[in-house]
């Protein structure tokens, strides 16, 4: 995290800085920092600009899945921006009026279905941009667009060496029952100055109340990297990325990416699912979604204009299997009268496509976890070697915790039990300085006799490339779809104000790494009898040149489950399909539409959750945050106590307060 951005935010807007770093928004701040792997101010600058107010929750009324919320005790919520004086951004700066068909562009969108409109990449958008912006061509790239049901559709192909658009002279449109079929037998490049053979077939149709379309394309002698559907007729308004809360991007351009930023986790706002919902008016919502049946990179680029958005929906083909053909997923667009309806239609598809079981029916959740009311996160050794708690002290802490709450209702999370946090990855042997094998075994066994359950931490995709053992799985490093090294290099571990470069980002889809990690986790389970294992950066799927990380994760978890069916697998953060593999996480991603997560999974507080007192993040690199002891009865997150060096000695009374709140939340007397 970049401290300079925090300073800039605090200097330019101290009220916003104070509000965002404390209060009920602290969970959202932690999510932005941890989930998107961005420091918070950088993310906020990208999305909203300065000044940025604090966030508060805004209820989204339920119409269909109310029973699911009642079962979990949740109220649906979405975050909205609140400006000084208590008014929301929508109240203080009225949203653009809903865009009717035919008003979304300076050209007449309401053409008869099948009309070809001669647009370019510069048509109907702000140039130069009025707010934050992204790279773009500095000339007019042809975008001949086909009109259908008040919207305009064009397409663009990307190979590994250039960009290609539709050749208007070789473009035909055929009307069919309920839709149109677009065919193109040649592409243009160099802004239309050059042409190249190729074919594209797009089917655009109505499906009930919504529009759907898909594309097949082929180049003669080049592999296709990705394709974008370029859509006009999209209204302006507040936007939700995935199932997150709504925010007002104003005149800023916006890039959303699925999953893990869609390959650009330092640039794009992450999405837990490839759906974007726009609130254009009080009862007017518009959504765009990709209906995937496998995990692939998707990006949504919103470029504002005076009357609507020009949107690029980019689908990226798997990098480990290059092909000169590409078949897109089905894309969907539609208007609804509620956010609930817009979200529901997408997540109903997600549940079916990825076979995600309801929480109450999951077979991968051991019975003991359903009784967990509190998580105690006892931090071990910092990257520098500083010890927060050794195993002997951890045992004393748990002895006291057992006097405050039945131990059977407590899970003990153990980050950095194996020595220097991240530096020792992926050896995963007990640190002698913390107490060695005997001390670790005593901690686990004595705690389990009381009823505690133990969850040690492992890095799902992190390895120190400087360790001698690295040669055993060095073939499993990650290169992105273009072949660039993708390393775990976004943390300043030693605080020299420069990111370190020894961390390698590993690919579970590659046998050598998956077998190594599986063996190390299995060894700890077998030797010490722990009750679960935690996978760091679990949602960090990256398109790459070697293998599918999602399928590698599935194989790892399924193999361990076959050997140890009573053991719980936990991830740091999720994306939609990952919930078919892992049932528990540390980040709640769905404040705009809680059922997208809460229907299937549960969460406790993140590793970096501030500890009582000064708000230390323990072994996590963020340092310090604002601690708040309150536990709400309706909160979706299992209450968690971060225990660092001074927590038990100085703030035992605060620990007791949190424990009391955790008991009240679930009705423990």
Image (cartoon, grey):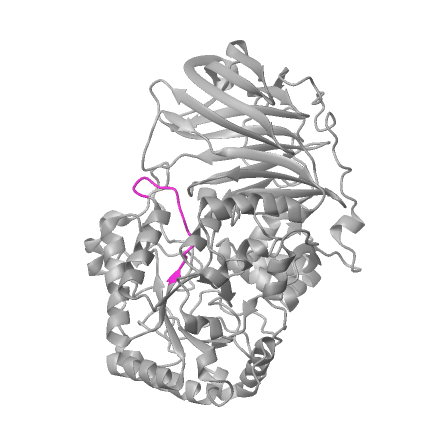
- Where residue 468 sits: x, y (%)? 20, 60
Residue drawn at x 59%, y 57% is 594
Q: Residue furthest top?
A: 169
**Residue 203 position in % (x across, y down):** 53, 23
Which residue corresponds to the image point at 50% horizontal and 48% vertical from the top-left?
351
Residue 2 visible in the picture: no
Vertical placement of 326 versus 266: above or below? above
Residue 159 image position (x, y, % from top left): 40, 27
Relative to 388, does residue 77 appear above or below in the rendering? Answer: above
Secondary structure of the magenta portion, mostly? loop
Find out whether residue 544 is within the magenta segment. yes
Residue 368 locus on image (x, y percent): 42, 74
Q: Quadrant of residue 126?
A: top right
For the record, the magenta segment spans 535-547
| Figure quadrant of the C terminus | bottom right
Looking at the picture, tell me which residue is in the foreground, 496 or 603. Answer: 603
Residue at image coords 40%, 62% = 363
Q: Position of 365 compared to 473: left or right?
A: right
When asked about the image quadrant of residue 501, the answer is bottom left
The reply to whether residue 82 is in sight is: yes
Horizontal placement of 239 versus 446: left or right? right
């Amino acid at each position: 995290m970049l401290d300079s951005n925090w300073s800039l935010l605090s200097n330019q807007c101290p009220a916003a800085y104070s509000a965002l770093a404390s209060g009920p928004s602290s969970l959202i701040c932690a999510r932005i920092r941890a989930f998107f792997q961005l420091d918070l101010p950088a993310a906020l600058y990208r999305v909203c600009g300065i000044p940025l107010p604090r966030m508060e929750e805004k209820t989204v009324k339920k119409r269909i899945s109310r029973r699911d919320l009642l079962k979990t005790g949740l109220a649906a919520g979405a975050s909205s921006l609140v400006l000084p004086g208590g008014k929301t951004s929508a109240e203080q700066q009225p949203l653009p009026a809903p865009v009717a068909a035919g008003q979304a562009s300076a050209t007449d969108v309401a053409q008869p279905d099948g009309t070809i409109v001669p647009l370019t990449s510069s048509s109907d958008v702000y140039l130069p941009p009025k707010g934050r912006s992204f790279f773009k061509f500095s000339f007019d790239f042809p975008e001949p667009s086909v009109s259908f049901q008040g919207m305009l559709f064009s397409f663009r192909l990307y190979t590994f060496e250039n960009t290609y658009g539709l050749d208007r002279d070789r473009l035909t449109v055929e009307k069919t029952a309920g839709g149109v079929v677009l065919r193109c037998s040649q592409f243009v490049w160099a802004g239309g100055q050059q042409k190249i053979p190729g074919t594209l077939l797009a089917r655009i149709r109505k499906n009930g109340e919504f529009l759907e379309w898909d594309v097949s394309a082929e180049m003669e002698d080049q592999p296709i990297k990705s394709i974008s559907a370029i859509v006009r007729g999209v209204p302006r308004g507040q936007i939700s990325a995935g199932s997150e809360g709504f925010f007002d991007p104003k005149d800023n351009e916006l890039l959303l990416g699925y999953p893990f930023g869609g390959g650009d986790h330092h640039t794009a706002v992450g999405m837990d699912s490839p759906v974007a919902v726009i609130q254009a008016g009080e009862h007017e919502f518009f959504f765009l979604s990709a209906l995937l049946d496998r995990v692939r990179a998707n990006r949504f680029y919103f470029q504002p204009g005076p009357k609507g958005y020009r949107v690029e929906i980019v689908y990226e083909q798997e990098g480990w299997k290059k092909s000169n053909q590409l078949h897109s997923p089905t894309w969907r667009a539609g208007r609804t009268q509620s956010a609930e309806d817009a979200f529901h239609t997408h997540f109903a598809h997600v549940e079916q496509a990825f076979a995600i079981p309801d929480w109450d029916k999951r077979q991968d959740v051991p019975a003991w976890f359903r009784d967990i009311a509190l998580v105690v996160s006892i931090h071990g050794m910092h990257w520098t070697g500083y010890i927060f708690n050794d195993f002997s002290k951890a045992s004393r802490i748990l002895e006291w915790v057992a006097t405050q709450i039945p131990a059977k209702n407590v899970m003990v999370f153990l980050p950095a039990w194996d020595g220097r946090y991240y530096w020792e990855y992926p050896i995963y042997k007990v640190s002698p300085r913390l107490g060695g094998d005997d001390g670790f075994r005593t901690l686990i066994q004595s705690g389990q006799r009381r009823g505690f359950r133990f969850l040690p931490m492992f890095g799902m995709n992190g390895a120190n490339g400087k360790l001698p053992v690295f040669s055993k799985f060095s073939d499993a490093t990650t290169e992105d779809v273009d072949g660039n090294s993708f390393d775990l290099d976004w943390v300043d571990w030693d605080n020299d104000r420069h990111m370190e470069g020894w961390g390698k980002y590993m690919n579970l889809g590659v046998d050598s790494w998956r077998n190594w990690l599986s063996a190390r986790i299995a060894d700890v389970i077998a030797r010490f009898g722990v009750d679960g294992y935690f996978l760091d950066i679990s949602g960090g799927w990256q398109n790459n040149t070697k293998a599918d990380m999602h399928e590698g994760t599935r194989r790892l978890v399924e193999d361990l489950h076959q050997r140890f069916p009573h053991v719980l697998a936990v991830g740091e953060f999720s994306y939609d399909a990952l919930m078919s593999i892992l049932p528990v996480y540390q980040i709640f991603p769905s404040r705009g539409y809680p059922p997208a997560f809460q229907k299937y999974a549960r969460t406790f507080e993140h590793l970096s959750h501030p500890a009582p007192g000064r708000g230390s993040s323990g072994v996590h690199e963020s340092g310090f945050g604002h601690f708040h002891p309150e536990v709400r009865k309706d909160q979706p997150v299992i209450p968690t106590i971060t225990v660092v060096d001074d927590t038990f000695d100085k703030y035992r009374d605060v620990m007791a307060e949190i424990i009391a709140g955790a008991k009240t939340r679930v009705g423990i007397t």
